[in-house]
Image (cartoon, coloured by chain):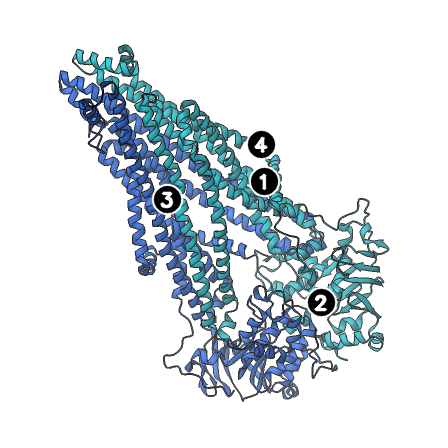
Amino acid sequence: MMGLDNRRGLLDSETSKPQNLGQTLARFSRYFRRFWSGVLVAVVFVFISTWAQVTAPELIGQAVDCYLFQPQANAQMMQMMQAGGDEAATAQTAATSNCWYTADDASSIEARIQADDSIPEDEKGAAMTAAKLAGIGGLTLLLLGLFILAAAMQGMAFYAMAWSGQNVLRDLRKELFRQIHRLSLGYFVRNEAGGVMSRITNDTDTIQQVFNFALLSVFSGALLIVWIAVRMLQANWIYALISLTVVPAMAVATVYFSTQARRAFRIARQEIGSVNADLQESIAGAREVQAFNREEASIAGFRDTNAANRDANVRAAAFTSALNPVLEALGFIALTIVVVTGGLSVLRNEPLLGVGAVVSLGTIIAFIQYVQRFNQPIQQIAVLWTNIQNAIAGGERIFVLLDEQPDITEKPTARELPPIEGHVTYENVWAEYKPGEPVLKDISFSAEPGQMVAVVGPTGAGKTTIVNLLPRFYDVSGGAVRIDGHDVRDVTVASLRSQIGLVLQDTFLFSDTVINNIRYGRLDATDEEVIAAAKIVAADSFIEKLPDGYQTVLGERGSGLSQGQRQLIAIARVALMNPRLLILDEATSSVDTRTERIIQAAFEKLLAGRTSFVIAHRLSTIRSADLLLVLENGQIVERGTHDSLLQAEGAYYDLYMSQFRYEEPAPGDETPQPAGD
Amino acid sequence: MQATASVPRRERRRGSKEGRSALLRAIGALRNQRRSATIAYGALVVATLAQLMVPLLVQNIINSVTDGAVANSILSIENPIVRNLAIGALGQQTGQTAEQLQLASQNAESWMLQTALVIVLFTIVRGAFSFVQAYMAEATSQGVAFDFRNAIFTKLQRLSFSYYDRNQTGQLMIRATDDVEKVRLFIAQGLVLTVQALLLLAATLIILFLTNWRLTLVVLPILPIALVLFMSFGAISQPLFRGVQKRLSRLNTILQENLAGIRVVKAFTREPHEQANFDKSADDLFSQQLSVTRIFMFLFPVIFLVAQIGQAAILYFSSAQILDNTLTLGEYQQFTLYLAYVFFPIGQLGFIITLMAQAAASADRIYEILDARSEVSNKPDAVTLPPMEGRVELDNVTFRYFGGSDPVLKDVSFTAEPGQTIALLGATGSGKSTIINLIPRFYDVSEGVVRIDGYDVRDVTLDSLRSQIGIVLQETNLFGGTIRDNIAFGRPDATLEEVTEAAKAAAAHDFIMSFPEGYETPVGERGTSLSGGQKQRIAIARALLLNPRLLILDDSTSAVDLVTEARIQAALDRLMEGRTSIVIAQRITTVLKADQIIVLDKGQVAAIGKHADLMENSAIYAEIYNSQLVDDAAPEGQG
C-alpha cells in the first residue's frame, strides 16, 4: 500500500511546475557551497571529456588526410606543378591543407624514403607502406588514449558530482527530519502526514536523480552541442548555418511530442489510479463482494476501468512512439542537407549562397560526423529537462516545509521545570486551531497533587484539546496553564514533557522489539527494569507468550498485536517512565473485553498517587474521579464528583442517562482480575 | 482466523526455472493480441531493413560527390597535357577512362540529388515503420496487461476466504499492479528489442562478412567481451541497487514512524534519540549510494570504451588494407557505420537480460494467483436454494484451515429454528468466526455437514445461498460509488425510498443527510472517508435492505462515542427482529434475549442453553458472562 501511496504522491508532484525558479536555485546552490570542490571537479572533467569527444573524430580524419589519401593528390600535384598554373594552386589548398597532425606526413615519408639510398629501390614501396602504417599506429594509440581519457574523465566527473549531490541530499534529509521534530503538533493537524512524507521521500528522490545524473548529463550534452556548433561555424560559417537548420526543428519536435506525451500520461496516471483503487477495494473487501454476490458486477466494473486505463496509455503511446522516429528522420534529413549543399558547393566550386568559403571534401566528412552527434544529447536533454523541472518544483515544496515556523517555541528565558509536585491550574484558558474559532472557551479549574480529573462530553466538545495543552502540544490563545505555579510557556519543553506520561487511545508502537518499545519511556532503563514495568501493568504474561518474548520484533505500527495488547505496551512504557503527571485517553471501542479489563486494572495501578487527567469513556473511571468536568462546545457546563452531579440532575445527569452504560454490579468489577490471556 | 495469518505462506521465491517457464507462458498471452503483435513485428522487420540500407546510401551519395569533385577538378585543368596526365594517373589507380570521367562530372549533381531523394524516401519509410512498430508494440503490451489484470481480478473475486487468509492485501495489490507492469514492460520493450537486436546483429554481421571478412574477424573477438561486460553490469549493479533500496526503506520507516507517532516522540521528548537514529540511516544510505556510484563511474564509461576500441582497431587495420589498395575509403566509412549496428544491439541485449530476470520473477508471481484453485465452488449439479425459511443446522462439524493442522472446530452440532436468535460465545480463538464463515460457505467443512432448511450448503449454488443471508461484521469495507450504491450493494435495483428506509432503521439517515450531497456522497477509496461507526451503520442498512431470512452478525461496535453506540445497538436489535440470527455476542442484551446460547471452548461446544440455565450449570459461561460481556449503552439493560 505504501508503494501505491507513493505513486499517487508522485502523480501530484509531476503536475507542478517551479513557481520561483531563481530563488530556489539560489537556495540549492547554498547547500552546494560546502561541497563545491566536487562540482568544480565535475565541471572541469566534463570540459576535458567533451574536448576529447570533439577531437576524436577529427583525429580519425587526420589518419585519412595525413597518411592515406595524400599520395594521389601529391602525385597529381607533382605532375601539375611541372606544368605550373593557377589551377594547381587552387587544387593544392583543397587537397593538402587538411593535415595538422604531423609534419612527417605521407608526402614527407615518401620523399624521405625516395631519397634514402640505403633502401633498395624495389623495397621502397613496402618501406613507405610500413612507415605510413607505423604513423597510423601511433595515431591509433593516441586515439585510444583520447577515448580512455574521455571515459575516465566522464566517470570521474559523474562520481564527483554524485559525491556533492549525495552530500547535499544527506544534509537536506537530516534538516527535514529535524524540522519535523521542530514543528508543533498543529502543523500535523493542518497538513496530512502523507504530504509531509512525500516531501521527504518523493521530492528528495526526484532531486537525487537530478543531482546524480541529470544535471551533469544536461550540462555535458549542452556543452557538446555548443562546442560542435562552434567548430562547425569556425570551419565554414555559412555551411554550418545551413547544416544547423535542422537543430531547431529537432528541438521543436522534441518539445511538442514530450509535452503531448506528458499530458497524455497525466490522464493515464489518473486511470491507473482508478485501477488501483478498484483493486484495493475489491481485494480488501473480497469477503463482502462474495457475501453479497457481487462478483460479476464487480468484474464488469473493473473491466471498464481497466479498459479506460489501457486506452489512455495507448493514446499516450502515440506521442512517445513518434518522438524517436521523428528525431531519427530529422537526423537523416540533416545528413542529406549536409551532403547535398556541401556537394553542390564542391561540384560547382563556388561558395554557398555566394558567401564565405568554398566547402572542401574534408569538411563534408567532418560535418557528417558532427551532425550525427547532435541527435543523442538533444533527446537526452528533452527527457532530463522534465526531471530537472520536477526537482526544482520538489525543492520548492521542501523549502516551504523547511521555512514553516513552529507555533510553539521556547522562550529565551525558559527555565527548567523543577520536579513536579502535581498541582495543576487552568486559568481562563482559551484555545483555537483556526483564528476566530475557539475550541475552548474560558476554562478554569485546578487539580491538587494526586487527584484524578476526568473529562467527559460528546465528540468535538474539546476534551482532547484540554489535555493537549498540558504538555504544551498547543499553546493557549488566552489565559494560562500552570503546573506547580509555573506557566507551561515559561519552562523548557524538554523538562516539561519528560515529566508527563501520556497514553493515547490509538497507541503508537515502533517497528522494533517489544523491549525497546517499552524502553522508549526511559532509554537508560535496564532489561530488568523494563520487565518489572511490564509486570506492574500485567503486560508481562502476554509478552512472554510472543514467539521471541520481549525480543519479538513488531511489524509496522505494532502489527501482529491486538489493539489491547498494543495499549498495554504503551502503558508499560509510561510505567517505566514513572511520571508525576499522567494523561490518559481511554479507548472507546469494546473489542476484546478481557484485555480491556486488564487495561483498566493497569490504568488504576498507574494512576495511584499521581495527578492525572483522563478522557473518560468508562463508568468505573468516572466514578473514581476526584473532579469531573462536563464539556460541551468548548465550555465546562458542570463540574463536581459523579455522585454530586447525579444528584444535581443537570447536564451530566442527562448525559449519563442517555450515554453511559449502567454498571452491572458483577463480581470482579470493582477489583478487576488481571486474568491471563 | 488470526492464527492462520501467521502460518508460513507458500514459498514465494521459486526457482528461476519456474520463472522462465512462467515468462514463456506470459509471452504466450500474446495470442490474444495477435493482430497488433503481427503488425508490430512486421513493421520491425521493415524498419530494420531500411536501417540497414542507410550506410549504403550514405556511401553512395558521398561517392557521387567525391567522384564528381575529382572529375571536375581534373577536367577543369585548362592545360590539355596536364589534364591528360592527371586522367592517366587517375585511370591507373581506379581504372576510369576519360569518357567515364566526363560522365561523372556531368552527372555528379543529378546523381547526388537522386540519391538524396532516395535517402529522404528511406527516411520516411523507416520513420513511418518504426513509429508503427513502437506504437503497436505498446498497444500490444497494454492489451496483454489488460488481459492479465482482468484475469487476476476475476480470479481474486472467486478465490475462497482461505486464500485471503494466507495472502495480504498489499501483496496481492503488488502482483496486480507492479508485477503486471514489469511483465508488460518486458513484452513492450524487452521482447521487441531482443528481436530487433538479434535481427540487426545477424544481418549486420552477414553484410560485414560479405564486404570484408578480414576486418570482421578483427571486430569479432570484441563482441563476446562486450556481451560479458554488459551482463556483468546487470549482475553487479542489481544487488547494489537492492542495498540502496533496503537502506532507503529503512530510512523511510523511521520517517514514517516519526510522522505517525509524532505525539509519542514529543511526549517522551525523544527527538535527539530519533535524530541520531535517522542520521545513522541517512549516513548508511549515503555511503551505499556512493559505492553504487563508484561501480557505475567505472562500468559505464568502460562499456562505451569497448565500442570505441573497436572503432580504433578498425581504423588501424583498414588503414593497412587501404595502403595495400584492397580497401577504399568509402568502404572503410561504410564499415564503421555498420560497426555501430553491431555494438548497439549488444548493449540492448545486456539491458534486456536485466529486464528479463525481473519479468520472469513477476510472471511467476502472477501465475501463482492465476493458477490458485478456489477451494469453494459450485458443484456441477448444484441446485438453487428455494426461498429460505431459516432453519440452520450444524451436524458434527469439524473444520481445519489446512489439511493436517489442528481442528479449529471439533464435532460442533446445533440447530437454529426459523426466527431464533443464536448467540455464540467464547474466548478469542474459540471458533466463533469460523462457524459464522461456514454458513454462507466461505469455507467448506472438513467433516460433518452444514444444512439450511435441510439442504447441505455444498449442494446449492453459491449465488442462491449467499443472496439470502445478510451479514454484518465489525469491520466494514465500503466500495467506490455513492453511499446509496453501498447501501444497495446487495440489491442494486432498490429504490431511493427503500434505501432511505433502511438507512433510517439503521440510524444512518441523520449522518448521511449531514453530508452536502446526502445519499449521493461518493465514498470508498476515492471518496469521503467515513468513521468506523458510520461504516458499521451503512453495513446494517445494507443488510436490512436485503431483508434476509437469515442474519449473521457481530454485535460489537467499533470505536464510536457512546451516543452513537447506543444508536447502533438499537439498530442491531431492530435488524435481528423476526429473523434467524446467528450472532457473535459481545453484549449482555443479546445473550439475555437469545433463544440459544452456544458456549464455545477451544473449538468445541462447551454448553448450550438459555441465560438463566447456563448461569447455573456452566462455569465457563458464568466466567465469560462476568468478564467478557459489555453492558449495554441503553438504559433498558438494567437488571
Task: Kindly identify the amino acid type of the residue bearing the numbered disc 4.
Answer: Arg
Residue B483 tag number? none
Q: Colour of chain A?
A: blue
Other-residue count near label 2 (Cα within 10 Å), few / some / many at <14 / 14–19 / ≥20: many
> Which structural element holds mark 2?
helix
Q: Mark 3 points at which residue?
A: A381
Q: Distance between the residues labelled 3 and 4?
A: 36 Å
* Chain identifier for the cyan-coloured part of the image: B
Foreground pick, A491 / B542: A491
Callout 2 amino acid: Ala
Amino acid type shown at disc 1: Val
Q: Where B587 falls versus B140 (above or below)?
A: below
Q: Mark 4 lies on which chain?
A: B
Query: Mark 1 packing: few (<14 Cα in 10 Å), some, or many (20+)?
Result: many
The tag earlier along the polypeptide, 2 or 4, is: 4
Q: To which residue does mark 1 refer?
A: B144
Q: Which mark is residue B35?
A: 4
Residue A117 shows up from this direction: yes
Horizontally, residue A327 falls left or right of residue B587, namely left
Residue B521 position, x and y percent, is: 59, 58
